[in-house]
Amino acid sequence: MTDTADTPVIEIHDLHKAYGSLEVLKGVDLTAHRGHVVSLIGSSGSGKSTLLRCCNLLEESQQGEIRFEGEAVRWKGQGMARHPADKAQVTRMRTNLSMVFQQFNLWSHMTILQNVMEAPVTVMKRDPKEVEAKAREYLAKVGIVDKCDAWPAQLSGGQQQRAAIARALCMEPRALLFDEPTSALDPELEQEVVKVIKALADEGRTMILVTHDMKLAADVSDHVIFLHQGKIEEEGPPESLFGAPKSERLRGFLSSTGKLD
């Protein structure tokens, strides 16, 4: 694994993904440099979440290259029969790419502290006492350390999503992947989570963010990718995409979201 400061954390080239005859990604490139935030925007069905899930191999692609810190995913088979060739490699990469889902996916039978500790202790075999100290630190970072002993059902949606972010952080990953982290929340609870994401961006964490919140994408991103029907229609720094969009499709999309006057 190449691990130099200028090696991208995630690099995707010419990625194709289909579900049977439905082609969802049609040759997509993505690069996430260390300390950068890349936002994926676009209409529902444009391929944003699928691309994010391909990043950490939750979805298998049929063509294209995926690299993590310079190391290429090894494949066997071709087309619809293509699968990762090395399970240990997949596990190692996944533990370094923590995902925060739209639905919080907390275990209802565990306390918030137990939820945050579970993967580092069980999957990564880290020392429980060290993990507990880290878990409390990350719960404090997201503003809910007082909820350590609560059950998920006792928390608001915003608090549950912040617990999910603390759980992702406790893996101490190289990058965080957010899949519509605020779309299941009421507007006032959404702002709690937006505040945490902005703070993480300010810390210089590497993040890929699928979001419907154009203001968030504009505020935190170093690079924005606008996907349309499985292809990149336009990409660049947020000031150019939101301030001076070139494509008619992007202008129409931003108008529909209220981001373009």
Image: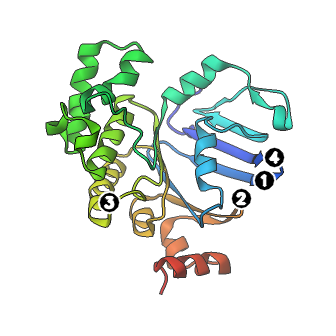
Q: Is residue 82 left or right of residue 48?
A: right
Q: Circle 4 sits on which residue?
A: 20
Going from N to C along the chain, the mark reached first, 1 or 3, is 1
> Residue at the location (40% across, 59% down)?
220
In the image, what residue type sits under mark 1? Glu
Q: Residue at x 69, y 19 (%)?
A: 86
Query: Nearer the viewer's eye, disc 1 or disc 2?
Result: 1
Locate residue 141 relative to residue 234 in the image: left or right.
left
Residue 226: mark in rendering: none
- The answer to whether the residues at label 2 and label 4 have Cβ atoms under 8 Å apart is no
Q: Are marks 4 and 1 in contact (CB under 8 Å)?
A: no
Please name the residue shown 37% across and 32% down the image. 107
Q: Position of residue 93 (x, y in %)?
A: 56, 28
Q: Residue at x 84, y 28 (%)?
A: 77
Separation (CA) of disc 4 from disc 3: 35 Å
Q: Position of residue 189 (x, y in %)?
A: 28, 59
Q: What residue did someone put label 3 on?
A: 190
Q: Amino acid at mark 3?
A: Glu
Q: From mark 1 to mark 3, how far is it between C-alphas? A: 32 Å
Labels 3 and 2: the sequence-earlier one:
3
Q: Residues within 10 Å of mark 3 (few under 14, many from 20)?
A: some
* Disc 3 from disc 2: Cα separation: 28 Å
Q: Which residue is mark 1?
A: 23
Q: Mark 2 highlights which residue?
A: 230
Q: Is residue 204 left or right of residue 210?
A: left
